[in-house]
Image: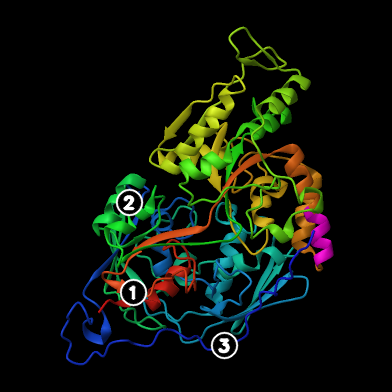
Amino acid sequence: MRIRKLSTVIATAATLALLATACSGSGGSGDDSTGGADGVSDKILTIGMPNGPQQPNQNPLANGSASLSLGYAFAVYESLMQVNELKPTDPPTPWLAEKVEWNPDSTQAVITAREGVKWSDGTDFTAEDIAFSIQLRKDNKELNTDFPDQYGDITVDGNTVTVNFLSGQYVNQVKLLKLLIVPKHLWESEDPVTWTDDEMIGTGPFKLKSFTPQAVTLEPNTDYWGETPKVGTLRYDTFNDNAGLTTALTTGEAQWGWTFIPDFENTFIAKDPDHFHQVAGGGFGVDVLYLNNETKPFNDVAFRKALNMVVDRADISATAGYGVWPQIKSVTGLPQPSGDAFISDAYADQELSVDVDGAKDVLTEAGYTWDGSGALVDPDGEKVAFTLQNPTGWTDYLDALGIISEGAKALGVEAPVEGVVQDTWFNDIIPFGNFQASLHWTDGGSTPWNMYANIMDGASYVPLGESATWNFGRYQNDEVTQALADFKAGTSDNDRAAALDVVQKHFVEDVPGLVIWSRPAVAQYSTVNYTGFPTDEDPYANPQPTGPQAALILSKLTPTE
């Protein structure tokens, strides 16, 4: 295995170069093409998401809240640094932290808070806010999806915060940099898990103006520490499904969002090729068919192997993904070319292919049979069947499940596809393991660690019925858990390569889940009203509006002339 060297994610103190004001405020004409006073445009920028009506929960730390689901949390609250997920080895850009310095084994980070920042209620932002926000995650496991049971002592000394970890965090450094920071003076008297944070007091470029289950409006934070945004009003509209958002994007009702658009070149871009754009970036993010390893039929590795052998990933990528989501070919599940340097030598030339006969041989050797109707019968004498679930309206996922169901049918297995309510899927089905098979994404990151850990890490294991943050399929293997920990704590490329060999061996042999396709960051936008979005030529940030990078992108948008 050839693991590329990754530059340590340590930011030095640097001048934050934000976009200079493009339009003079003199005259205050308010003309839409040049902006109003101080260059702020009168035009609304509408961001769309296909997530259905939202509950009034603005909590930026709580999974499933409206502010995270639609993304407006990231225009109100900000992260320590700006990380370009499309170029994860590039140095991060200082944001609420002027610098973050890691020790050699990545068990300690020293954060220097930016001075001169205020919360939107006028209170000074300090290092205490950073320490408090991290301590919240440590004290509340429901909020600690990035570092479960891994925080040590968190201390403040003047303008610096020292965060200690119980193990090396080489692979997780960017996760610390991307944490949203909340105000201690307001949050310390609230339950951070259940509080709905109705006023949203943040440091970001925008403030909450109004909320309804269908639409949220933000207004500029006139006391923002950075460059005053040129976007006069942000509106976040939620649509019932991908089709609804696609219509909104093609008609101009929404000007920024991300959804799966089948045949996007004809469906979307051709409607206004001068202004409509879709941009995508690479990385290590993938979509995984999580399999419930603790219930039939997926508690049997033989059946998991057999299903893996009949899934037509080429068809899924071309038909369900319209080529937008690239096919996974390596048996290791790694997306390529991002993952080429990380594939174990043992699997360097091994690719996935459809092999129905081979799958039936695996099942026969494991004691499966077929009855007179051709239905697969397990060693206990029961017919094999399972249900594939994903939210209604997520057309790419549901179409992919349909092709997976066809593969199962070739084995004599009935596997119906069931659409479910998005909120139910997010809050009940996935975290508590109330499913047999369901597609879900993984984190990206600068190495494959996140992909494998999200699928296989025993450190994220909780029993069925308890809420999981990752490892939704409840896979358990002590050797894999240790290898993932060794990779994360490794201080040399050789150590990490040896650990990854172990992880990939068990991924291939145990089939804890099925990586279906790679998931580059995709977004659609219109330049009718505003320009400055990330492009294929200038991929300065993940182009989606639902991450900490939103504050950076909003700082670069200017009214279209």
The answer to whether residue 546 is above or below residue 321 is below
Q: Nearer the viewer, residue 189 or 250?
A: 250
In this rendering, position of residue 190 left or right of residue 72 = right
For mark 1, does the 10 Å Cα neighbourhood hold few (<14), some (14 to 19), or many (20 or more) residues? some
Quarter of the image where the C terminus is located: bottom left
Q: What label sits on residue 503 in the rendered view? A: none
The residue identified by callout 1 is 531
Front position among marks 1 and 2: 2
Residue 498 covered by magenta stretch: yes
What secondary structure prevails in the magenta region?
helix
Q: Spatial distance from mark 1 to mark 2, Cα to Cα?
A: 22 Å
> Reading the chain from its start, which is encountered first: label 3 or label 2?
3
Q: What label sits on residue 14 in the rendered view? A: 3
Q: Secondary structure at mark 1?
A: strand
For mark 2, does the 10 Å Cα neighbourhood hold few (<14), some (14 to 19), or many (20 or more) residues? few
- Where is residue 110 drawn, in percent x and y? 66, 78
Res 374 visible: yes
> Reading the chain from its start, which is encountered first: label 1 or label 2?
2
Front position among marks 1 and 3: 1
Kindly identify the residue that appears in the image at 71 percent across and 66 percent down: 170
Kindly identify the residue that appears in the image at 49 percent across and 71 percent down: 539
- Residue bounds of the magenta highlight: 493-500
Quadrant assignment, res 39: bottom left
- Where is residue 452 drawn, in percent x and y? 68, 50
Q: Is the residue under label 3 in contact with that under label 1 (CB below 8 Å)?
A: no
The residue identified by callout 2 is 267
